[in-house]
Image (cartoon, rainbow, N blue to C red):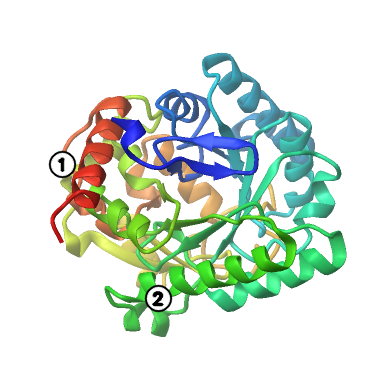
Amino acid sequence: MHESLPDLIIGNLKINPPFILGGMGVRVTEHKLCAAAANTGMGGTIASVGLGHNAVKGKNYVQGSNNALAKEIKLARKLTKGVIGVNIMVALTNYAEMCTTAAKEKADYIISGAGLPMKLPEYVGDSKIALIPIVSSGRAAKILCNKWLTSYNRLPDAFVVEGVDAGGHLGFNMAEIEAWNEDSHVRVCKEVIQVAKDYEEISGKHIPVIAAGGIFDGNDIGKMLEIGCEGVQMATRFVTTEECQAPDNFKQAIINSTIDDMVIIKSPVGMLGRAIKSPFTERVNAGETIPFKCPFHCISVCKPKEVPFCIAVALLNAVDGDIDNGVMMAGHNAYRVKEIVPIKTLVDELTSEAVAYLNREK
């Protein structure tokens, strides 16, 4: 069935079905889910943020995080021969070190967002690792291409174009979120596809575009492939797979959610984020300050003495099962998820739906 969909080719990597597992921190997409995804033929991703938080316990945060990421990549490699990569947020204080670690451990790709990864090539040196920035506009894609070409004689190996319906931290302000409509994501994807084509003419390098943010079913996948995207990135639907290490009450919160439970919060990262409503998000959106001690300073723009809560602690609470005191990041369509299934079942379903959409009578 997977052969009925076109391959997603990123440099020397061949991915089919053309799906990438979105990186979900903290500790939602770890090595087991990454490897399980890769074993279906899609790209498996480890989210680097928060991997070392519980292990550090007052020790060197940077080294502890590096060690934790290296361990996760090694564990994933033992479980799969497929394509695996790492999602690394630009906003991390140890961003450079984590990128270097991913390259040293021979991950297949780095996906990087929560800011434009202007210096990413600098941190991986001569490594063959594929570099995939997340962008939210054609303008951002062009700025990045110009910078990388001028400073590093290199271009991105692919782009992920993330729309406002994504879970987690968003590259949009509230006005942009409210103005978003069904055609907005298509428009932005087409903008980035054109930028990619322009630079292909300059360099001869093909840069595939991967749609992300609110991709829920095979119809969504088919639509994005039809407009010229060569793959999709999906995250939230894979939380409710048997292989995901998130706790059962986290998964049930998604299954039990309604459209009214999809909320936007202002994160200490300096960006807006989409999550499932919880007692904690209610307190945050009511303007309450939730005291904390900062054990990490993991986000470069965070000012621990000024921000109203710690996003790292809130995310850790949720993945540890304390959802009343946690933040459960999720995409806008999370409320449509109604069951927990094996990852192979989900991937086969998505593939079948996408094939049916592409083969429909027009």
Q: Which mark is residue 187?
A: 2
Point out the tag, 1 or 2, that comes first from the N-terminus. Answer: 2
Q: Which mark is residue 338?
A: 1
Q: Nearer the viewer, residue 241 or 357?
A: 357
| In this picture, residue 168 sits left or right of residue 292 | left
Q: Quadrant of residue 205?
A: bottom right
| In this picture, residue 9 sits left or right of residue 28 | right
Q: Position of residue 216 (x, y in %)?
A: 27, 51
- Give the alpha-carbon distance from disc 1 to disc 2, as whole Å: 30 Å
Q: Position of residue 7 (x, y in %)?
A: 45, 40
Can you say which quadrant of the picture contains the C terminus? bottom left
- 26 above or below 148? above
Q: Position of residue 350 (x, y in %)?
A: 26, 40
Residue in the picture at 37% in, 77% down: 177
Q: Quadrant of residue 90?
A: bottom right
Can you say which quadrant of the picture contains the N terminus? top left
| In this picture, residue 123 sits left or right of residue 43 | right
Q: Position of residue 197 (x, y in %)?
A: 58, 67
Of circles 1 and 2, the one toward us is 2
Name the element at disc 2: helix
Q: Amino acid at mark 1?
A: Lys
| In this picture, residue 31 sits left or right of residue 204 | left
Q: Nearer the viewer, residue 36 or 222?
A: 222
Q: Nearer the viewer, residue 43 or 69?
A: 43
Q: Residue furthest top?
A: 78
Residue in the picture at 29% in, 53% down: 222
